[in-house]
Image (tube, rainbow, N blue to C red):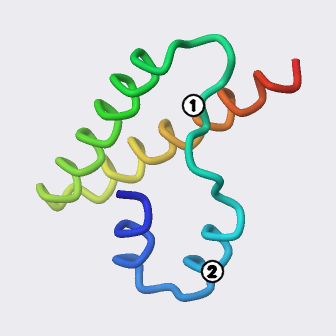
Amino acid sequence: FHRQIWLAAGNDKLVTSLQELWNGLSMGVLISREDYAKRSCAEHERIMQAILDRKAAAAESEMRLHIERSLQDVLTHYR
């Protein structure tokens, strides 16, 4: 899912940078794998629906929420 979004952006530098940074699951220690998967899938579905509906602002908003949530999950490892 992630790589396809990156490729669709048409920005080779973005793809290269994100591939080097992304390590797969950003699951923190405060959530089960099942709950993480459900939440992540729901976020992905909202992002994809906004893209399919050609609602750029909604897609951007959903993507930002997804990225921010993922960052917070990663940071739980350091708390």
x 35%, y 69%: residue = 4
N-terminal of the two: label 1 or label 2?
2
User: How many numbered markers are drawn?
Assistant: 2
Task: Name the outermost residue toward the right.
Answer: 79
Identify which residue, 40 or 50, lies in the foreground.
40
x 54%, y 88%: residue = 12
Task: State the SS at label 2.
Answer: helix
Where 17 sits versus 79, above or below?
A: below
The image quarter containing residue 74 is top right
Where 43 sits versus 48, above or below?
A: above
Q: Which residue is mark 1?
A: 69
Q: Position of residue 42 (x, y in %)?
A: 29, 30
Q: What amino acid is labelled 1 in the image?
A: Arg
Q: Position of residue 62 (x, y in %)?
A: 39, 41
Task: Quarter of the image for the C terminus: give it.
Answer: top right
Identify which residue, 67 or 56, lies in the foreground.
67
The numbered disc on residue 47 is none
Task: Quarter of the image for the N terminus: give it.
Answer: bottom left
Task: State the SS at label 1.
Answer: helix
User: In 3D space, how far apart are the residues under numbered discs 1 and 2 (Cα atoms)?
Assistant: 22 Å
The numbered disc on residue 16 is 2
